Image (cartoon, helix red, strand yellow):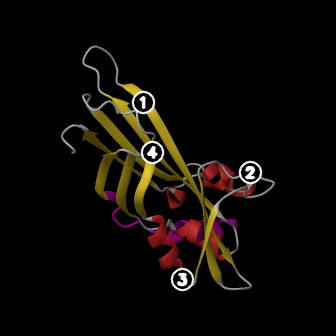
Amino acid sequence: MFLGLWLGLCLQARAAGPSEISDMRLEHADEGFFLSASLRFDLPTLAEDALQKGIPMYFITEAEVLRERWYWYDQQVVKATRHMRLSFQPLTRRWRLNVSPTPFEGNGLGVVLGQNFDQLADALAAMQRIARWKIAEPGIIDPRARYQVQLRLWLDLSQLPRPLQIGAMGRSGWNLSLERSQRFAPESGR
């Protein structure tokens, strides 16, 4: 019985399609430093199954700006983080995406931006589009220096309920991680 259940779960884990961060744009304006990008990924099958059963999934998007230095390791200038909580409400058959600059706490969602969607594809499309995300305040970026910007997105398994955390560790059916680096020189506008 247990072997059959285990084989069934292993067969459910499908190979995810191509995951990538494309069209990453960086903009240095008077108001600050902005990042825009298009992400492409498929939800892992096990995560989608858990969502259908009403278990929320948590995602973290992180942008890190490093100042390039020839004489030492690159210096971290700023790190911006965006937390997303995707959930399905079985009674209303609607998807909800909450976005917050701070981690979600166990006692509530805090101050977040929430959107409702009728289809999972619409909610994923909203997650995969980053438009003018302010990752640094004005004055932090030196226009004469060169920078490396690293953008990452991953499924935060530490926010899953304990029984799922134990089963998810080391299983490829839960893996979702994207990463891209790009150089940026504010003076040239690239």
Disc 1 element: strand
- Mark nearer the N terminus (1 vs 3): 1
**Residue 153, position in %: x, y?**
46, 52
**Mark 2: few/some/many CA within 10 Å (<14, 14-19, 20+):** few
Left/right of residue 187 with respect to residue 94 in the rendered view: left
Q: Mark 1 or 3, which is nearer the eye?
A: 1
- Mark 4 / mark 1, whichever is N-terminal: 1
Estimate how packed mark 1 is, as few (under 14), some (14 to 19) or many (20 or more) residues with alpha carbons within 10 Å. Answer: few
Instruction: Tell me the SS state at disc 4.
Output: strand
What type is the residue that disc 3 sits on?
A: Gln
Tell which of 33 and 139 is nearer to you: 139
Q: Is residue 5 magenta?
A: yes
Query: Mark 1 and 3 residues: CB-CB less than 8 Å, in contact?
Result: no
**Category of crowding for the residue at label 3, using alpha-carbon neighbours closer than 10 angstroms: few (below 14), some (14–19), many (at least 20):** few
Task: Give the residue drawn at x 32%, y 15%.
Answer: 72
Per the image, the residue denoted by label 2 is: 105
Q: Residue at label 3?
A: 119
Magenta segment: 1-21
Q: Is 52 drawn above or below residue 102 in the view shown?
A: below
Q: Would you name the residue on which mark 1 appears?
A: 77
Which callout, 3 or 4, points at the residue further toward the start of the chain? Answer: 3
- Comparing 183 with 139, the one in front is 139
Q: Amino acid at mark 4?
A: Ile
Which three-letter amino acid code belongs to the residue tagged 1? Val
Q: Which residue is the site of mark 4?
A: 135
Q: Position of residue 71 (x, y in %)?
A: 27, 13
